[in-house]
Amino acid sequence: MLDLTGTSSIVTGGASGLGEATVRNLAARGASVIVLDLQDEKGDAVAKSVGGGYVRADVTDPEQVIAAITAAEEHGPLRTLVCAAGIGWAARTVGRDGTYESAHDLAAFRKVLDVNLVGAFNCIRLAATAMGRTEPVDADGSRGAIVTLASVAAFDGQIGQAAYAASKGGMVGMTLPIARDLAAIGVRISCVAPGLIDTPIYGEGEASEAFKDKLKRDVVFPKRLGHADELASAVVELLVNTYANGDTLRIDGAARLQPK
């Protein structure tokens, strides 16, 4: 097992939702966690609550990500990275009126891929470089581990999810080749594909609860939305389990999403 005590970790998108739950789970395992996000108030609060640090950074900006890595290294050798930052965009591929203008916005498609896929790869390539400079921690030559958060939309994306599903499918697809690349430096990478997890993204109130109640129709068991801690515990296990590498794990209650 990879011992996180006295090490540093970076969680992108760590200011809220699944990222925040992961930050807290990593801190409970002894890691000093850097929250990388663009939500200053929330990010700083989460970081302070676990004795870590907050760095405002855009995952697509190499210099800002390097600054976050440098900040992490001040807390201890960088051993783990979790890529939880992401955005969504709901739009059908073609419009209802049959005009070119109503087709899916191309800039929006590029933006989702840039943040979710290119941004994740940017963080992976830079954090893995830093991990490769550390001393191995075991006889196998292990130096660190990375987990990316994709989505079940990578496999059964719904109507209007072309951009989001493409970005998450790309994350799944790059996992094995990156694992093969990083084997040379003793760094592992795994991917988690969350199902319908109850996070603040769904809002609050009666309408929100009604919407979430509808969502759980696709979940087999347990018949509910997942909890952030259930997802975070799987993420941390993949980081510390030194034989977990190169694959994608669905955490979804056996859900298979319907078209809409």
Image (cartoon, grey):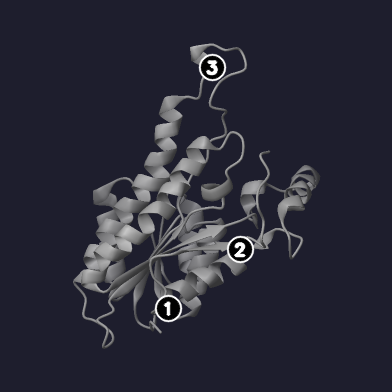
Apparent side of residue 63 relative to residue 229 in the rendered image (left or right): left
Which secondary structure, mark 2?
Answer: helix
Which secondary structure, mark 1?
Answer: helix
- Which quadrant of the figure contains the C terminus? top right
Residue 239, given in percent of the width and then of the height, sits at 42, 73
Q: Earlier in the sequence, mark 3 or mark 2?
A: 3
Residue topped by disc 3 = 102
Q: Amino acid at mark 3?
A: Ser
Q: Quadrant of residue 208?
A: top right
Q: CA distance from mark 3 to mark 1?
A: 47 Å
- Which quadrant of the figure contains the N terminus? bottom left
- Residue 217 is marked as none
Looking at the image, can residue 58 be seen?
A: no
Q: Amino acid at mark 2?
A: Ala
Residue depicted at x 77% and y 47%: 214
Residue 81, given in percent of the width and then of the height, sits at 37, 65
Residue 43, given in percent of the width and then of the height, sits at 47, 57
Residue topped by disc 1 = 240
Residue topped by disc 2 = 228
Which secondary structure, mark 3?
Answer: helix
Q: Amino acid at mark 1?
A: Val
Q: CA distance from mark 3 to mark 2?
A: 36 Å
Tell which of 119 and 67 is nearer to you: 119
